[in-house]
Amino acid sequence: MSHKKQLPASQRDMLMDVLRKRFEKNRGRHKDIEWAGVQVKLEANPEKLWSLDEMESTGGEPDVTGYDKKTGAYIFIDCAPESPKGRRSLCFDGDALASRKEHKPANSAVEVAKAMGIELLSEEQYRDLQRLGPFDLKTSSWIQTPAAIRKLGGALFCDRRYNEVFTYHNGAESYYAARGFRGVLKV
């Protein structure tokens, strides 16, 4: 980033309070992690806190879902019950958006994620999230797509139906009111 994105102190304090309360309410998502360590990391990384605010303001309800022992990073994932409301009706990426001749969506999932400073979930991350509870029972979420599939015009998305997680494909240029994306951020 050419310039650091930071929140005003009052907004930062409100977000930290929301994140702390969500963390405490959902201990099953992060059994062996203490809030004090998360707070120290967030305070030391204001640009990551800005990204978490973007996740929160678009309906993602980000929460800690893990800790990477190799990098020392806490892993935040959108834990809203359904795909974040403020990130739906998007095609997959910028190339897909450019390929649409009419009825273009407002943007693409990959471009919005990049602007927010986050990444789309991988299929593995999506499946790990589903082990923490039922998500996307009525919606679906774009996920990272292998280059070979994307080169052929496709993109992948997931949802949970019949108590199972499904991975599907669609044309990358498609978009639906019930499909958005979930993000991951390492702090």
Image (tube, grey):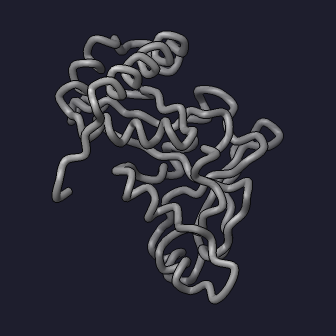
Q: x%, y% of residue 37?
A: 25, 16
Q: Residue at x 23, y 35 (%)?
A: 46
Residue placed furthest toward the right: 162
Q: Percent x, y for residue 28? A: 53, 15
Viewer-proximal residue, 102 or 124?
A: 102
Does 137 sit above or below residue 151?
above
Give the camera-side residue of 131 and 75.
75
Picture quadrant where residue 115 is located: bottom left
Q: Position of residue 2 (x, y in %)?
A: 16, 59
Image point (62%, 52%), residue name:
141
As drawn, 111 above or below 1: below
Give the quarter of the image for residue 172: bottom right
Q: Residue at x 41, y 52 (%)?
A: 119
Residue nearest the viewer, comparing 27 with 2 = 2
Vertical placement of 142 versus 44: above or below? below
- Horizontally, residue 107 falls left or right of residue 31, namely right
Q: Is residue 124 above or below residue 113?
A: above
Q: Is residue 32 left or right of residue 26?
A: left
Q: Residue at x 22, y 30 (%)?
A: 72
Say which quadrant the C terminus sits in: top left
Q: What x and y, as percent, mark residue 128?
A: 53, 36
